Amino acid sequence: MKKNFKMSLAVVLMSSALLVACNKNNSSNSTNNASPKENNTKVEHNVHSDHAKEESQDVALSDWSGEWNNIASYIDDAGLKGAYEEVAKRDNITEEQAKKNFSDRVAVDFGAMKVDEDSITFFSKPGGEEIEKANFKYVDKHPMEHGGKTLYWYEFSSDGKYPTILMMPVHGEDNMPHFHLRVGGTAEEMLAKDNWYPTFVSPTVTIDQVYEEVAE
C-alpha cells in the first residue's frame, strides 16, 4: 500500500513539473512572437516618418539669414601667402597658379550679401554699395554626389538680376561658418559646371580660418 502511494505521488509530482515547464515555454513563445511585431511596427514607423520628411520642404531662405562675405574678398590678403605655397607644393604648380585656381573656383560678381526672411540684398563688396535687393522663393532641391556623400543644392528663384540661386546649407559652425552658392540663369546650367563653389563666410571670420579653406 505504501509502495503504491509513493508511486502515485511520484506520478503527480512529475505531471506538475511538466505542466510548469510547458507553461514557461508557452509564455516564452508568446513573448517571442510579440517582439517581431513590435519591432516591425517601429521600423515601419521610421520608414514612413523618413519618407514624409523627405517629401516635405525642408528648407527656407531664412535658414541663411544674416550677413555674408564672399571669401574672394580675402584672396589678396598677405596672410594667405603660405596657403598658396602649400597648395603649389602639393599640386606641383606655381603660387600664382594656385591663387588663380582658387579665385576661379569661388568666382561670382558680388562681394557680399544679406539674407533677410525671403529677400537677398547683394553688395559689390563687404561694406560696399548695394547692387540689388530681390525676393526669392523656394523651387526644388538637387542632389550631388561628392566624396562618397549625397549633398544638396537648394534652388530659389526671383525675377531680378539673378533668376536662380543655388545654395548649400550653412556648415562649419564650429570653425568657420560658411556655405556655397551658385547664381545664374537656370539650375541645369549651373549644376553642369565642375569645380565652381563660390563661398560665403561669416563677417567674423579670421584670416587664419580662411587660410584653412584655401589650403584644403
Image: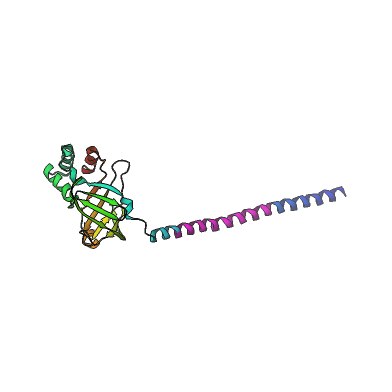
Q: Residue at x 18, y 45 (%)?
A: 73
Total label count?
0
Residues 3 and 137: in front is 137
The reply to whether residue 94 is in sight is: no
Residue 93 picture quarter = top left
Point out the stretch of residues depicted in magenta: 21-48
**Residue 20 within the segment the image draws in magenta:** no
Seen at 84% across and 50% down, the residue is 5
Near-viewer residue (97 or 27): 97
Answer left or right for 175 relative to 127: right
**Residue depicted at x 16% and y 50%:** 104
Q: Is residue 93 left or right of residue 201?
A: left
Up-down relation of residue 48 to residue 74 (above or below):
below
Residue 24 on the magenta span: yes
Q: Report the predominant secondary structure element of the magenta stretch.
A: helix
Q: Is residue 79 left or right of residue 143?
A: left
Displayed quadrant of residue 167: bottom left
Q: Residue 49 lies in what quarter of the image?
A: bottom left
| Residue 189, percent from left and from top | 21, 61
User: 170 or 37: which is nearer to us?
Assistant: 170
Q: Position of residue 142 (x, y in %)?
A: 30, 59
**Quadrant holding the C terminus:** top left
